[in-house]
Amino acid sequence: MTENKNMITVPSEERIGKPNDLFFIWFAANIGILGVVYGAMIVGFQLSFIQSTLAALIAALSFVLVGYISVIGKKNGITTFMLSRAAFGTKGNWIPNFLGWLNLVGWLSVNVVTGTLILLSLATIFHIDQNSTITLICLLIFATLVLLSGLLDQQQLAKLQTFFTYVFGGLTLIILVILIPQTDFQQLFSMPNGSWLKGFLPAVSIIMAGTGISWSIAGADYSAYQVPTNKNNAIMFSVLFGAIIPLFVIMFVGILLSTSLPNIATSANPIDVIAHALPSWISVFYFITAVGGLIPQCIISLKSARVNLETLNIQVSNRGSLMIHGAIMILIPVYVLFISQDFLYNFQLFLGLLGIGIASWAAVFIADYYFNRKSGYDLKLLEPKGSHSFNKTGIISWSIGVIIGFLFTNTDFFSGPFAGGIFRDNSLGLLLAFACGYIAYVLIHPFMSDRRENK
């Protein structure tokens, strides 16, 4: 996004995207073979085959949120957290904006660690011994592939994601077809129904947390480049089906494989677990496919992370952004791979807690837009030096959602006072944060007539 109206809107000459661009962007972002683990995790909540399949479908539908935010971005030609200034104020937006940036660079670093480990597994096939030097080389190779994507403009990015969709999507499909016959169908269909409240709902929530809700912070970052006259339904369905088709299919295979690979959801290295279930002749293609499935996710995280920096009024060149994010996505994996592997587990727990803030932000964001969808946003609300510094309605509603979310969330190093029963060891607290943030906004909004004033 270049200078235009204080860098608020995407210049009209850059708004040339087509709806199918979004289809391929989100399709490529969801072709990762690790989606198989999500499917196995669902079964792990002691659910039947029908319940597990339904849970996977409902969880994948969480991309409705990304689709809706994409529609907002298309209508306004404005990226996600720039639009978020209307709901929170230009200064009130800093905290959720910063949390969004942390979430993006955090999961980017985790994916780089995973990609490095996959490349190491690939190296063993060629009888290359694993050592510190080889590990560092694999890390630099994967990080370089991701960083090179940062040199692409929006149209080049759409073409690259289309390439990934066809090539690595096709390879993923071949891998899945080879894996499916290993299913123990008798065991699969004999699994008894689990609790809808204590099993089904937590299963849906934990997958939604890692898919649609997590990606909501990037929705408008790509639709802002769409032609303004593109139909809203075309935007919504392109995002929705682009994400759901690969995500649901891969999770469904994970449900099937839970019978033959029962430890896949709990293994420290599920990629290797899947590899051992494949014939040796396809191992090279499998690991290449696994790497190719991770890169599109990293590309989206990297691009949106730069957009988030700009919204925080940290103006850096594209080269500067690549240097900052490149350093992060190398230093954290170096620490994980060479110093403390335990750090990765705790880091992922931390990123999971950030999801509570993201969920509450998404709820407030769409609630604010709902009440302003007819009149649209006045661009003055989004100007960094404008009068709209704080929106009390948005800030209070977001805070309520976050507080309630934490009260009902437990992890190894944090446990809310009400995080027991159906709220224990899952992401229901995150969904509760979303629901409470939205409800709080709807209830508070009528009483805040001065919500657009400077405070």
Image (spheres, helix red, strand yellow):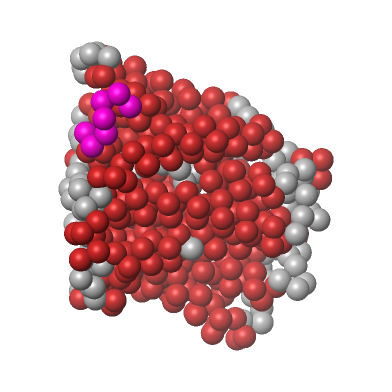
Q: Which of the 4 image quarters holds residue 156?
A: top right
| Residue 350 percent coordinates (x, y) | 31, 52
| Residue 330 percent coordinates (x, y) | 38, 28
Residue at 20 percent across and 48 percent down: it is 260
Front-most of residues 212 and 356: 212
Query: In the rendered image of this protein, does residue 227 appear above or below residue 270?
Result: below
Q: Locate residue 344 relative to residue 104 in the image: left or right.
A: left
What segment carries the magenta color?
275-282
Query: In the rendered image of this protein, does residue 294 appear above or below residue 403?
Result: above
Residue at 34 percent across and 23 percent down: it is 284
Q: Locate residue 302 relative to residue 176 in the image: left or right.
A: right
The quadrant of the image that shows the N terminus is: top right
Principal secondary structure, stretch drawn in magenta: helix
The quadrant of the image that shows the C terminus is: bottom right
Q: Which of the 4 image quarters holds residue 195?
A: bottom left
**Residue 12 sits inside the magenta stretch:** no
| Residue 139 percent coordinates (x, y) | 35, 24
Residue at 58 percent across and 32 percent down: it is 163
Front-most of residues 395 and 11: 11
**Residue 276 sits inside the magenta stretch:** yes
Residue at 29 percent across and 76 percent down: it is 196
| Residue 102 percent coordinates (x, y) | 43, 47
Q: Is residue 326 among the parts visible in the rendering?
A: yes
